[in-house]
Image (cartoon, rainbow, N blue to C red):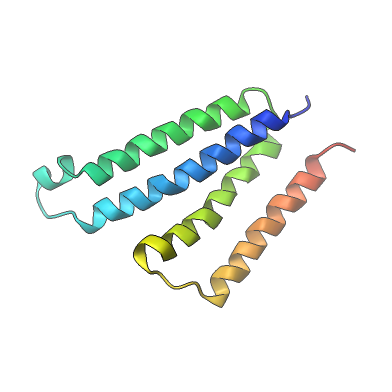
Amino acid sequence: METPVSSMIWVLSASFVGSFGAVLLKAGAIRLERNWASLFLNWRLGAGVCVYILSSLLFVRGIANGELSLLYPLVALGYVWTMFWSRLFFGEPLTKIKFVALFVILAGVAMLGGAIGPK
């Protein structure tokens, strides 16, 4: 089975969208109080869950016509986006070790893509 580019785009889109789900869940978690109403009335948490559902739908669409072993590593690119959103929205530091870790993730995705791609 050959993996179409459209499948890769769907999975990359899922990864990108999912990274916003993490941002929304964190934004909601920051505002949680110790009561049930806070949990159920927190629109950020609800939006985060909805964004993750959308991400999952995009992912399912992507893997339907491609090789899972090629497509699944693309999900790891969500970590790249999440690191930058964390800096942008929450002021979290971008440290050397985070950049090293991102390099390792990107290298791993590239290696898997090369190892699994056409011969």
Q: Is residue 51 above or below residue 79?
A: above
Residue placed at 39% from the left, 50% from the top? 22
Q: Is residue 109 above or below residue 89?
A: above
| Apparent side of residue 108 relative to residue 37 in the rendered image (left or right) | right
Residue placed at 76% from the left, 52% from the top? 111
| Apparent side of residue 2 relative to residue 25 in the rendered image (left or right) | right
Locate the C terminus and report the quarter of the image it occupies: top right
Residue 53 horizontal/vertical position (percent): 40, 33
Residue 74, quarter of picture: top right
Q: Is residue 34 above or below residue 40?
A: below
Residue pushed farthest front? 88
Residue 1 horizontal/vertical position (percent): 78, 24
Residue 80 horizontal/vertical position (percent): 55, 56
Residue placed at 78% from the left, 27% from the top? 2
Q: Is residue 71 above or below residue 24?
A: above
Q: How many marks?
A: 0
Residue pushed farthest bottom? 96
Residue pushed farthest right? 119
Residue 26, quarter of picture: bottom left
Residue 4, quarter of picture: top right
Residue 77 horizontal/vertical position (percent): 58, 50
Residue placed at 53% from the left, 49% from the top? 78
| Apparent side of residue 108 relative to residue 95 in the rendered image (left or right) | right
